[in-house]
Image: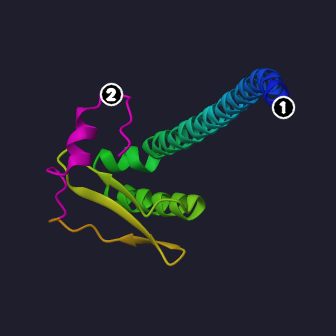
Amino acid sequence: MRSRSGRYLLALVLPSALLCLVFVFSLYQEEQERARASIAAAERARLAAGVRLLTHDVGAIASDVRMLAGLPSLAEALAGDAAAMDRAARDFRIFSAARRSYAKVRWIDDAGRERIRIDYAREEPVIVAAEPDQDKAGRYFFTAAMRAGRGEIYVS
């Protein structure tokens, strides 16, 4: 009799246990999929925020370049006015002091010579005297910028 009840119990319990195991495994799989979907959504949101931030930062840099390029003192310096060169350097210094985010602000002419340079160090912008041997014509940033079309801005 004992073996009969044992077989009967085994015939009932084993399928029930297997059914419970399948059910629990199914719940586990669903939970794993929900967790993956949640992580993926969070990563997409972080990526989108990073893209917005980078786009904003590059846009601000482009805006700064346009503002500096539009300075009347720079236009006059480009025309060869020596006094305008000093005014443009002061304007660049004022810009650097206001922005406080660029280590160097430079005007490099179309031949690759550094004409104006402002270094931002120790919380203060300083006009650095132009040295004739500061030729940047072979530097990657100069050659890439010179390949840009009129009105285009190259950011390195």
Query: Camera-side residue: 52 or 16?
Result: 16
Indicate yes or no whether the magenta region holds residue 37. no
Disc assigned to residue 135: none
Residue at the outermost front position: 1
Distance from the alpha carbon under mark 2 to that under mark 1: 96 Å
Query: Camera-side residue: 63 or 25?
Result: 25
Q: How many dots with numbers? A: 2
Secondary structure that dominates the magenta span: loop
Query: Camera-side residue: 112 or 138?
Result: 138
In the picture, residue 155 is in which quadrant? top left
Compared with 110, 11 (above or below) is above
Disc assigned to residue 2: 1
Q: Position of residue 49 (x, y in %)?
A: 63, 38
- Stretch in magenta: 134-156
At x 59%, y 60%, the residue is 98
Instruction: Name the amino acid, label 1.
Output: Arg
* Crowd class of label 1 (few under 14; some 14 to 19; many from 20; radius 10 Å): few
Q: Position of residue 111 (x, y in %)?
A: 17, 47
Q: Which residue position holds label 2?
A: 150
At x 53%, y 60%, the residue is 101
